[in-house]
């Protein structure tokens, strides 16, 4: 190796992550070139921002895919979870949602100091993990999971052992769980970046504004004068509903006899009767009747994060 080549190449331990937009070809077919191009670019901008928020660096963008490097496995896992969460909360474009799949692996990489590109076995394995991942899924290797803190390892599960080109031994394939279920916690819930650390819900009723945040985690709605938001409509119950913050989510719970009608912008109206629903993006709630039946008194909501 010459002196000049040793100065431009440096071997380091890094986590390499690929985030790929699922079904981009289909997006162009459904949305048309202009809308699909704008939706994909908007997604890539979000992925760039979240990469930087987690101490990562975008190496390059390859069509509808972004390649990033992170200091270690934990920061890559945190970034991956937040990428999936943020994308899942994005409003659809013409009723079509943009989803991503993510693969990453942590190991030695050869980093070119001139252009910042990275090369080596770690890059190839990370790309292979991405090819295995399905829409809204995060895939990594057993070797990478072993580098995570114990609490983060509880939010992973082993899927299979697969052969990878250029590797003599099979590679353990694992999934990182970012969604909540009955027996698992959402990893991103414990590892949010400063961008997501203080979510707020803004409510607007009859020109008055209310905010749900860490200082005011719950608001009640109804005809009772003790309710936080007093509804004049006689079809509303005295304590008709409540909205409460649960970690980084805002949950609407109907407590009424006549039900609540909730509309998220761009989606169909949903009826709730003694049921719960997570509020996303922005929209409105009508208490005791549909919005179309009487749009004069509604509660608008806007999720801020």
Image (cartoon, grey):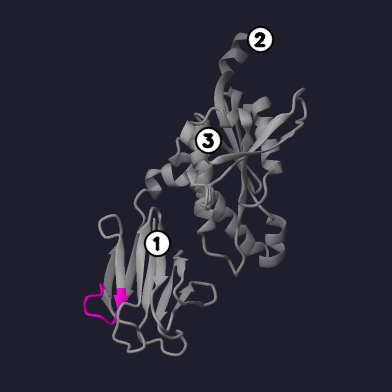
Q: CA distance from mark 3 to mark 1?
A: 27 Å
**Nearer-N-terminus badge (1/2):** 2
Q: What mark, if any, has residue 3 been given in the picture?
A: none
In the image, residue 145 sits, relative to residue 94, either above or below, namely above
The numbered mark at residue 250 is 1
Horizontal and vertical percent position of residue 35:
61, 64
The first of marks 3 and 1 along the sequence is: 3
Q: Nearer the viewer, mark 2 or mark 3?
A: 3
Q: Give the numbered dot on residue 1.
A: 2
Residue at x 53%, y 31% (from the top left corner)? 73
Depicted 3 relative to depicted 56: above or below: above
Q: Would you say residue 223 sits in the magenta stretch?
A: yes
Q: Nearer the viewer, mark 1 or mark 2?
A: 1
Q: Secondary structure at mark 2?
A: loop
What span is in magenta? 221-228
What residue is drawn where x is 51% and y is 78%? 269
Image mark for residue 153: 3
200 inside magenta stretch: no
């Amino acid at each position: 190796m010459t002196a000049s080549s040793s100065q431009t190449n440096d071997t380091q331990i890094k986590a390499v992550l690929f985030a790929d937009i699922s079904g981009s070809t289909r997006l162009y077919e459904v949305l048309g070139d202009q809308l699909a191009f704008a939706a994909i670019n908007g997604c890539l901008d979000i992925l760039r921002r979240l990469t930087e928020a987690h101490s990562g660096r975008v190496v390059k963008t390859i069509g509808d895919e972004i390649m990033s490097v992170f200091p270690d496995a934990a920061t890559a896992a945190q970034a991956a979870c937040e990428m999936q969460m943020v994308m899942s909360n994005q409003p659809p474009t013409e009723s079509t949602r943009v989803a991503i799949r993510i693969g990453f692996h942590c190991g030695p990489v050869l980093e070119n100091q001139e252009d910042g590109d990275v090369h080596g076995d770690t890059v190839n394995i990370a790309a292979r993990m991405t090819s295995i991942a399905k829409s809204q899924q995060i895939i990594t290797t057993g070797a990478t999971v072993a580098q995570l803190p114990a609490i983060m390892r509880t939010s992973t599960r082993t899927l299979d052992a697969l052969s990878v080109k250029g590797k003599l031994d099979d590679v353990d394939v694992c999934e990182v769980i970012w969604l909540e279920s009955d027996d698992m916690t959402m990893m991103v819930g414990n590892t949010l970046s400063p961008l997501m650390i203080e979510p707020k819900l803004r409510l607007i009723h009859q020109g008055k504004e209310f905010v749900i945040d860490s200082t005011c985690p719950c608001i009640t709605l109804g005809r009772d004068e003790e309710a936080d938001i007093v509804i004049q409509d006689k079809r509303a119950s005295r304590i008709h509903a409540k909205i409460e913050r649960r970690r980084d989510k805002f949950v609407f719970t109907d407590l009424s006899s006549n039900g609540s009608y909730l509309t998220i912008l761009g989606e169909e109206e949903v009826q709730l009767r003694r049921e719960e629903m997570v509020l996303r993006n922005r929209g409105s709630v009508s208490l005791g009747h549909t919005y179309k039946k009487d749009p004069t008194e509604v509660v608008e909501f806007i999720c801020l994060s």
